[in-house]
């Protein structure tokens, strides 16, 4: 068995005439798969088909805007506060999953008020199922980008990543890191397991009869996994090192705590209330 894995996969799937990165492909596959899953859920419950398209417009915009602003305000405000126009340079990188989660939550509340006229929990209990799958694909995209990996390890599945990715893509010799925890894979596996659990909860156990239960399990499991994995992950910004030394947590962990608490509350609230009666006609409503 190898002492470690040398990871030299090129982040660019296609470099000419148009650059296509693995990360972008994973993102696109995730949104396509998510649309298909939610489409089947809405049909299963007899909702109008047009609601699906509207939801994904809201979610797509909210994900990008929320993730970008999350990075700006949670991790690098000192830099962006003096270069406000750089906030719009999304192609240069800088997205935060916690910001994306907040953006999606705001979007679903607006969507529920303007489109479905239902409780936001009705939408969340469906939407979070494919989001777990999308999260796994995005972490695989991070793996191809040689980013968001962990600290040094002597475990046999440690990965040696290219440290000078930009220069390497342009033709320079790769500068390899020491073997590190492939935390992208750790997170991807956790999210895939969560996706499988949520699919079972919806399709086999009819957990949607208890509004908020699927949503609560999603929050609790996903952000608990994120919290634990952060202990072997490198910090996103240098100032987080001091934060770890001061309070024993980095920014990613601090931001995860409210989501975990909210998830536990949603689970308790859902279990304490009786299941609601629901019909599953298996076809879209004719409502306009």
Image: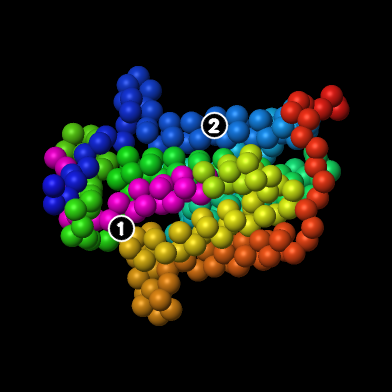
The residue furthest right is 287
Pick the front one: 42 or 28: 42
Residue 231 is situated, as x and y percent measured from the top left of the image, at: 36, 66
The residue at the point 56 percent across, 50 percent down is 100
Q: Is residue 93 visible?
A: no
Residue 73 is situated, as x and y percent measured from the top left of the image, at: 53, 60
Marks 1,2: beta carbons within 8 A:
no
Q: Is residue 287 left or right of residue 187?
A: right
Magenta residues, start to end? 173-195
Secondary structure found at label 2 = helix
Q: What is the number of the mark on residue 150?
A: 1
| Residue underneath mark 2 | 33
Q: Is residue 69 left or right of residue 173?
A: right
Residue 228 is situated, as x and y percent measured from the top left of the image, at: 42, 64
* 275 in relation to 33, above or below: below
Residue 143 is situated, as x and y percent measured from the top left of the image, at: 33, 44
* 176 in relation to 137, above or below: below
The residue furthest front is 204
Q: Is residue 69 left or right of residue 25?
A: right
Q: Is residue 53 visible?
A: yes
């Amino acid at each position: 068995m190898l002492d470690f894995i040398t990871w030299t996969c090129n982040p660019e799937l296609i470099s000419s005439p148009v650059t296509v990165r693995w990360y972008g492909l994973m993102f696109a596959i995730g949104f396509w798969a998510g649309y298909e899953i939610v489409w089947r859920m809405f049909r299963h419950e007899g909702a109008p088909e047009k609601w699906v398209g509207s939801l994904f417009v809201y979610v797509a915009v909210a994900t990008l805007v929320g993730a970008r602003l999350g990075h700006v305000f949670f991790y690098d405000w000192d830099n962006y506060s003096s270069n406000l126009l750089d906030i719009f340079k999304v192609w240069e990188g800088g997205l935060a999953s916690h910001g994306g989660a907040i953006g999606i939550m705001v979007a679903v509340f607006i969507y529920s008020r303007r489109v479905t006229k239902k409780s936001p929990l009705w939408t969340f209990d469906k939407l979070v199922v494919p989001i777990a799958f999308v999260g796994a694909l995005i972490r695989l995209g991070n793996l191809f980008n040689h980013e968001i990996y962990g600290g040094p390890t002597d475990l046999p599945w440690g990965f040696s990543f290219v440290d000078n990715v930009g220069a390497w893509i342009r033709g320079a010799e790769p500068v390899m890191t020491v073997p590190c925890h492939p935390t992208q894979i750790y997170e991807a596996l956790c999210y895939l397991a969560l996706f499988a659990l949520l699919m079972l909860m919806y399709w086999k156990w009819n957990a949607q009869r208890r509004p908020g239960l699927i949503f609560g399990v999603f929050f609790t499991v996903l952000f608990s996994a994120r919290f634990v994995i952060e202990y072997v992950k490198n910090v996103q910004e240098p100032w987080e090192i001091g934060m770890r030394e001061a309070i024993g947590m980095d920014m990613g962990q601090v931001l995860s705590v409210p989501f975990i608490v909210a998830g536990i509350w949603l689970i308790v609230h859902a279990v304490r209330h009786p299941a609601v009666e629901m019909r599953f006609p298996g076809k879209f409503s004719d409502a306009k």
